[in-house]
Image (cartoon, helix red, strand yellow):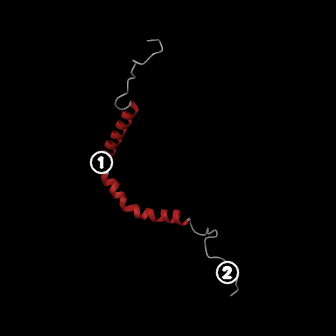
Amino acid sequence: MSVQDHSGYRERHQEGMSTKAKGGLVLIGFLVIAGALLFTEHRAHVLGLLVWLPLIACPLMHFFMHGGHGHHHGGGRPNDSRSA
């Protein structure tokens, strides 16, 4: 067996999850628990604000979906060159 011969050497395979993956799972678990506790403690406030959601959504949808008023750049009726 020479100095360069590594045929008897076996690499150690890492078993299980890495530290980064374990930390990610712990973070996800923490966020789920924190979210559940926040929802249960503030449920009355959150659900009470849902009543106002349609009133807020209407002007926001009008603004973002129509693009406002008076700014029609070529999207309206075509110009009629015939005289009436």
User: Tag 1's secondary structure?
Assistant: helix
Judging depth in this view, the residue of 70 and 2 nearest the camera is 2
Q: Residue furthest bottom?
A: 84
Mark identifier at residue 74? none
Query: Split into 4 quadrants, where in the image is the C terminus?
Result: bottom right
Q: Earlier in the sequence, mark 2 or mark 1?
A: 1
Which amino acid type corresponds to the residue marked 1 in the rendered image?
Glu
Q: Residue at 33% across / 40% down in the picture?
A: 29
Compared with 52, 10 (above or below) is above
Q: Residue at 48% across / 64% down in the picture?
A: 61
User: Tag 2's secondary structure?
Assistant: loop
Asked whether the beta carbons under mark 2 and mark 1 sit within 8 Å of each other, the answer is no
- Pinpoint residue 40: horizontal percent, then vertical percent: 29, 49
Say few, some or many: other residues with alpha carbon within 10 Å of mark 1 (under 14 / 14 to 19 / 20 or more). Answer: few
- Pinpoint residue 35: horizontal percent, then vertical percent: 34, 45
Judging by the rendered image, the residue that carries numbered circle 1 is 41
Q: CA distance from mark 2 to mark 1?
A: 63 Å
Q: Residue at 40% across / 18% down in the picture?
A: 9
Judging depth in this view, the residue of 54 and 16 nearest the camera is 16
Judging by the rendered image, the residue that carries numbered circle 2 is 80
- Pinpoint residue 70: horizontal percent, then vertical percent: 60, 69
Would you say 80 lies left or right of 1 here? right
Which amino acid type corresponds to the residue marked 2 in the rendered image?
Asp
- Pinpoint residue 42: horizontal percent, then vertical percent: 32, 50
Q: Residue furthest front?
A: 1
Compared with 8, 61 (above or below) is below
Judging depth in this view, the residue of 10 and 59 nearest the camera is 10
Q: Residue at 40% across / 32% down in the picture?
A: 20
Query: Split into 4 quadrants, where in the image is the N terminus?
Result: top left
Observer-side mark, 2 or 1, equals: 2
